[in-house]
């Protein structure tokens, strides 16, 4: 069982892993902690934004939408590989997912198919939204994939987790397709190699 890092510790970890990080507003205190618990943490979740344009994407993830208030993640990874921190604490990114998947993440075993939405994921996962249209055609620049690899590895390194603690939204919540355009298996391989 792992307690979440402090905001300062989180920032430090990301930078020490070589990520280029930008702090957006009072990100350390922007969260949804009044809506429920944050922690214990069990993993890292990767998403795509289904949007384009840095400014629009960062604003959307910070503020949220009428039906889903922000922040929508901890960090936004834009196509240039920069990690923009928009929130810290409980944030609206994972939603309800499958308790069998959560058990597999905790045990760092291979994931079962997600077929239930019965468990609060916002409490248990660090979350990164990555700028991509998610249409299967929009490219994922290498610098952006490398940033995903670095932030995921940074968090795993802190908590003593393996690459199996890194999952995609599509592996958590039935009906979700993100991230689309690379496989989570390939990203886990990258994280595994970085953690060696
Ligand atoms: Zn998502």
Image (cartoon, rainbow, N blue to C red):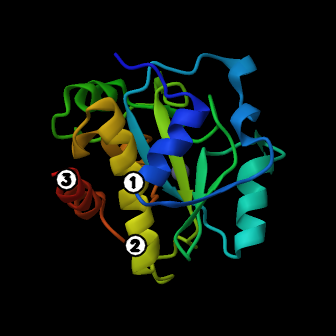
Judging depth in this view, the residue of 176 and 105 nearest the camera is: 105
Distance from disc 1 to disc 2, alpha carbons, whole Å, reads 24 Å
Distance from disc 3 to disc 2, alpha carbons, whole Å, reads 20 Å
- State if disc 1 and disc 3 touch (CB < 8 Å): no
Residue position for label 1: 17
Residue position for label 3: 192
Judged left or right of residue 136, residue 36 is right
Judged left or right of residue 178, residue 163 is left
Give the number of the mark in front: 3 or 2.
3
- Please identify the quarter of the rendering in which residue 132 is found: bottom right
At horizontal 61% and vertical 45% (from top left) the residue drawn is 73
Give the number of the mark in front: 1 or 2.
1
- State if disc 2 and disc 3 touch (CB < 8 Å): no
Q: Earlier in the sequence, mark 1 or mark 2?
A: 1
Q: Earlier in the sequence, mark 3 or mark 1?
A: 1
At horizontal 84% and vertical 45% (from top left) the residue drawn is 66
Whether residue 16 appears in this view of the structure is yes
Give the percent coordinates (x, y) of residue 180.
43, 67
- Residue 41 vs 10, above or below: the answer is above
At horizontal 20% and vertical 26% (from top left) the residue drawn is 107
- Residue 78 vs 172, above or below: the answer is below
Residues packed near mark 1 inside 10 Å, few (<14), some (14 to 19) or many (20 plus): some
Give the percent coordinates (x, y) of residue 29.
74, 32
Whether residue 176 appears in this view of the structure is no
| Residue 102, label in figure | none
Give the percent coordinates (x, y) of residue 50.
61, 66
At horizontal 45% and vertical 58% (from top left) the residue drawn is 177
Residue position for label 2: 181
SS assignment at label 2 = loop
Judging depth in this view, the residue of 167 and 119 nearest the camera is: 167
């Amino acid at each position: 069982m792992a307690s979440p890092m402090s905001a300062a510790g989180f920032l430090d970890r990301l930078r020490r892993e070589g990520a280029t990080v930008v702090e957006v507003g009072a990100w350390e205190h922007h969260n949804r902690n009044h809506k429920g618990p944050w922690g214990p943490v069990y993993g890292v979740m990767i998403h795509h934004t289904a949007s384009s344009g840095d400014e629009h994407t960062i604003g959307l993830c910070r503020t949220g939408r009428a039906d889903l208030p922000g922040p929508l993640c901890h960090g936004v990874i834009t196509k240039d590989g920069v990690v923009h921190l928009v929130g810290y604490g409980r944030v609206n990114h994972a939603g309800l997912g499958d308790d069998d998947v959560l058990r597999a993440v905790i045990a760092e075993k291979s994931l079962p198919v997600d077929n239930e939405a019965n468990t609060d994921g916002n409490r248990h996962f660090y979350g990164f939204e990555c700028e991509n249209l998610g249409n299967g055609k929009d490219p994922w620049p290498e610098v952006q994939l490398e940033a995903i690899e670095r932030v995921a590895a940074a968090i795993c390194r802190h908590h003593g987790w393996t690459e199996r603690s890194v999952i995609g939204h599509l592996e958590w919540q039935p009906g979700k397709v993100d991230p689309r355009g690379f496989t989570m298996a390939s990203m886990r391989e990258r994280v595994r190699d970085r953690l060696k």
